[in-house]
Amino acid sequence: MPETASVSHVESARDTALAELAAAGTAEQTEAWRIAWLGRRGQLTQVLRGIRDLSPDERRSVGAAANQVKNILEQSLAQHQHAIASSKSEAEDRADAIDVTLPGWPAPIGGLHPTTQMLREICDAFGSMGFDVVEGPEVEWDRYNFEMLNIPRGHAARDMWATLWVDEPDEDGDYPMLMRTQTSPMQIRTMQERKPPIRVIVPGKCYRYEATDATHEWHFYQVEGLAVDRGITFADLKGTLYEFARRIFGEERQVRFRCDYFPFVEPGVDMSISNFKDPETGKRPINRDEDWIEILGAGMVHPKVLEGVGLDPQIYTGFAFGMGPERIAMLKYGIEDIRLFYSNDLRFLSQF
Ligand code: DAH
């Protein structure tokens, strides 16, 4: 670029500049171009500075042309920078290309929760003995969860179930709604809905107002069982639950019944399964230093409960039982802490 400038100089400078810009293939080259043409000492800047030495006429025409070229170069620079930033190098293109010959990522497949598996196993065992599976509400009336199960208001036995009450008063200002503490209310609902012979099994979630520790959760499952008909005896209860224990824990398993108290059964019992040491290895089937391990509560349906649903206890009798499937799974699989079931840790859950 000569020291003094004319319009034609300015225009040929523009063409040279644009040709050089087109040849700048990288961001670095583009930046070097910017400094060479538009920088403080750049060629076009020099021309603009030289304008003051021209005659007024020339000053006007060359000045206008130089300013126009400056605008063109600035715009072209911006476009070029944008084009370079968005275009990828060939190497980058190759790295991004999909190699259809590579094996795919394995998609992780979910599994059934250990509680669900246990519930299914329990329901299958009773299902094959003629029990129907039914389900009921988790938000219950005091009537069903307690009163009609022979646990009236103010009865000391209510202390057996630390209850989560629902904050919804009735017209008398009582709070009759709760999160069911047990599946036993379904005994009442079932006897109100069905006529004997009744044989049902009720898996379902229960809630208690309880601090959690290795053996207590504030929410957990229970499985309730109920059989009502003419002539049902304690022998039917024993036979049914013995069969159940052998299906879940193995043929060689023995059971033991002991007296226990539940307000809605009379007599009430708990059932344990045998856990004897193997005479040769000295090992126990369940890794716990006890000969008998309790797995459920049961009993003959209390006459008051039958009367409450309009069944004559002189004609009908029945047995009922209730168990915690998490507890059964813990025994079966040697799980030490019930909190593992509902803390959503896949390292635990994926073992089942
Ligand atoms: N519902 C009782 C509980 O939560 C368990 C139970 C015991 C259920 C004896 C029964 C039964 O049906 O007969 O502790």
Image (cartoon, rainbow, N blue to C red):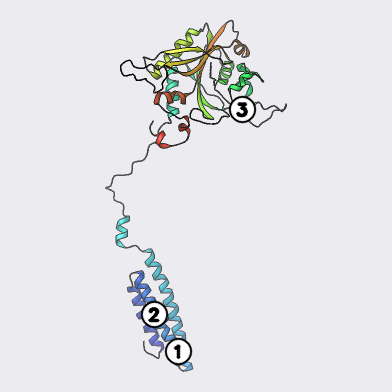
For the point 69% across and 26% down, the residue is: 174
Relative vertical location of residue 103 with respect to residue 65 in this rendering, above or below: above
Mark 2: amino acid: Trp
Residue receiving disc 3: 178
Callout 2 crowding tier (Cα within 10 Å): few <14, some 14–19, many ≥20: many
* Residue 212 screen position, x and y as percent: 52, 31
Q: Which residue is mark 1?
A: 51
Mark 3: which secondary structure?
strand
Q: Residue furthest left?
A: 101
Q: Nearer the viewer, residue 229 or 326?
A: 326
Residue 37's label in the rendered image is 2
Q: Position of residue 198 (x, y in %)?
A: 52, 13
**Can you tell me whether the CB of the residue at mark 1 lies under 8 Å from the nearest atom of ligand 1?**
no
Q: Disc 3 vs disc 2: Cβ atoms closer than 8 Å? A: no
Separation (CA) of disc 3 from disc 2:
82 Å
Classify 103 as above or below 122: below
Q: Quadrant of residue 71?
A: bottom left
Q: 58 or 231, which lies in front?
A: 231
- Name the element at disc 1: helix
